[in-house]
Amino acid sequence: MAAAAPALADGDAARGRTLFSRCAACHTVTDQNKLGPHLSGVVGRVAGTVAGYTYSKAMAAYGKTWDEATLDAFLAGPAKAVPGTKMAAPPIANAQDRADIIAYLKTVPAS
């Protein structure tokens, strides 16, 4: 029998908005790309598909839809989740911080 995936922590979107400041150097929550792709409407979007952004071959081929689980794994270790990704930010080790950032991203509609 397969082991159940660990439950994700409940996120606090307001705290996540504050924590997102560490992401804002490279990402926006509008429809404008920066060093990284914009994150407007990221939850529910297929990875590697923002128009006008040049992804690594690894991210373009990743093919998964961003949801709580895929975002959590990516934020916990970008290079482990998607070997070859261009994202150079360090992993976010704290599970509650990741949950809060994801909760915030869930509130950001597609532009």
Image: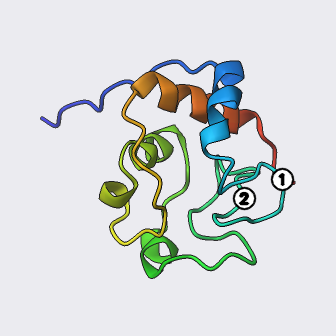
Quarter of the figure that contains the N terminus: top left
Hey, which residue is sitting farthest left in the picture? 1
Q: How is the image coloured?
A: rainbow
Taking the image as shown, residue 69 lies to the left or right of residue 39, namely left
Give the residue type at disc 1. Thr
In this view, the residue in front, 5 or 106, is 106
**Nearer the observer, 28 or 4:** 28
Q: Can the viewer see residue 76 in this picture? A: yes
Relative placement, left or right, of 12 versus 41 is: left
Q: Are dots 1 and 2 in contact, CB under 8 Å?
A: yes
Helix, strand or loop status at disc 1: loop
Task: Identify the residue at horizontal 49%, vertical 62% (top origin).
Answer: 87
- Residue that numbered label 2 is attached to: 38
Mark 2 belongs to which amino acid?
Answer: His
Using the image, determine if residue 108 lies above or below residue 51: above
Left/right of residue 23 with respect to residue 70 in the rendered view: right
**x and y percentages locating residue 24 in the rendered image:** 69, 47
Locate residue 17, reporting x and y percent: 70, 30
Gap between marks 1 and 2 measured at Cα: 6 Å
Could you say where residue 99 lies in the image, as x and y percent from the top left?
52, 28
What residue does disc 1 label? 30
Name the residue: 72% across, 65% down.
34
Residue at left offset 47%, top offset 53%: 89
- Crowding around mark 1 (Cα neighbors within 10 Å: few <14, some 14 to 19, many 20+) is some
